[in-house]
Amino acid sequence: MGEIGGFKKFNRSDPPERVPGERVGDHREFVRALPLVELKDQGARCMECGVPFCHHGCPLGNLIPDWNDLVYRDHFREAIDQLHRTNNFPEFTGRLCPAPCEAACVLEIEEGNAVTIKQIELAIVTRAWEERWIVPEPPAARSERTVAVVGSGPSGLACAQQLSRAGHSVTVFERDESGGGLLRFGVPDFKIEKHVVERRLAQLAAEGVEFRFGVEADAAELHEGFDAVVLAVGSRVPRDLPAPGRELPGVHFAMEYLYGRNRDVAGAAAPAISARDKHVIVIGGGDTGADCVASAHREQAASVTQIELLGEPPARRSDELTPWPLWPVKLRTSYALKEGGERSFAISTTGFSGAEQVERIHWLQNSGTPPFAPIAGTEESRPAELVLLAMGFVGPEPALANSLGVERDERGNIAAPAYATNVPRVFASGDARRGQSLVVWAIEEGRRCAQAVDAWLCSSAVEPAAAALRR
């Protein structure tokens, strides 16, 4: 374990951030790393509990006490091996995961005192890349089996890497011009710079994974050209807002805006949607909404307001609602709102108005809980020259699944119990299977789907070298 009594000797240290006034002027990552001596102190705080609830909180089942102790002892080389045993891409989760492991940490019984697991994870993998410990790991031999993975988000990439290391020949189809899915085009650079994604794509390519970018996967080609097909297409159909004036120019889905911003930052294409000098309204309070708020700040919007349908949560964890070690429902202020802007809870949008494009938004307050009963006399109108709908996603796009004959479940996601669909040889993983979720769940889904595909291929005449999946 870490230092005996370390959790009493050292306080929790959160990672430093660049000040808002500086970071809104560029698109570089704003979260900084702790110095080595502080990282070792944070590792020393881990108690290596008899029942490590952090394992329960982490969908990947990361061996958290092990690598906390290794960082405390400055054994980073061993730590990255432990981290990679359960997580293909810890630099993705170390940047983007909300850290349910920390919410489940025993020290979090005293709220706000958890071990800084996420920061330690990111420090391990950052050091590993700097020291060039992360290298391609191609299989010793190839099976005669071929697998198509449709989608190059974290679930598709994890599945592809696991299957390739097991010896199968893997081809990844991606309709966008580059790989990474929403990691590249949906999440801004100031949260994850795109070279972080590129180097993993390069690793997979060096391990033998073939990438086909800018290609819409064809059902006939998938059926005829591959022994197995994995649908890792994400949950990309956005939730719409049926309200008067929704059709006005200037009302857009959040991903329309973020995709344009990411391509603009990369120098790939000029954006069709801009927030510069506009009064911006963001409808939706999740991560996507926060990314829209922060991107609008960097475009120097005239004002930015974020509204949420739900009522304001309690300031601290409520043991009646979400007791430890559950993920706590409590008030959180996003990094984006720390940079500026307003936020309002319990708001129901009643419509939009304008002459040739949206000019105003109309809303009223609601009860804050379902069925969100309107409160009479609270009607209000605000300037709105750009409205971004960031209300989540309702399921995967249907075209490919329909052409393959794949069934949906009652929620609209691809029905794939144990990752296999109703169509022989076709599997599904990630958000397409479980619904919109976290990056850590996407990676876990990809790994488990790879196990299911490999087991099926192993039972189908040709025995692949499957040991890498079970390391």
Image (spheres, grey):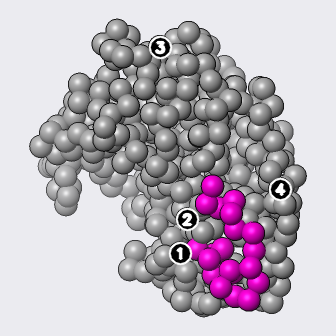
Callout in the foreground (2, 4)? 4
Comparing labels 1 and 2, the label whose residue is closer to the camera? 2
CA–CA distance in space, label 2 to label 4? 20 Å
Q: Which secondary structure lies at badge 2?
A: helix
Task: Give the side of residue 80 with respect to residue 199, left or right.
Answer: left
Residue at 78% of width from left, 26% of height from top?
131
Residue drawn at 29 percent across, 32 percent down: 106
Q: Could you say where residue 156 lies in the image, as x and y percent from the top left? A: 66, 62
Q: How many marks?
A: 4
- The disc placed on residue 448 is 2
Regarding residue 7, the answer to whether it shows in the image is yes
Q: Residue furthest left?
A: 320
Q: Find the distance from the CA under tag 1 to the CA under tag 3.
A: 41 Å
Which is nearer the eye, 283 or 279? 283
Mark 4 or mark 3, earlier in chain: 3
Q: Which quadrant is home to the C terminus?
A: bottom right
Answer whether residue 460 is magenta in the image: yes
Labelled disc at residue 138: 4
Residue at the (59%, 90%) spot, across then down: 423
Marked residue nearer the N-terminal end (4 or 1) = 4
Query: Label 4 amino acid?
Result: Pro
Asked if residue 264 shows in the view, the reply is no
The image shows residue 158, relative to residue 93, as above or below, that is: below
- 365 with respect to 387 (left or right): left
Q: Is residue 296 above or below residue 468?
A: above
Going from N to C along the chain, the mark reached first, 2 or 3, is 3
Q: Give amino acid for label 2.
A: Arg
Q: Residues within 10 Å of mark 3 (few under 14, many from 20)?
A: many
Residue placed under numbered mark 1 in the picture: 419
Q: Position of residue 447 (x, y in %)?
A: 59, 61
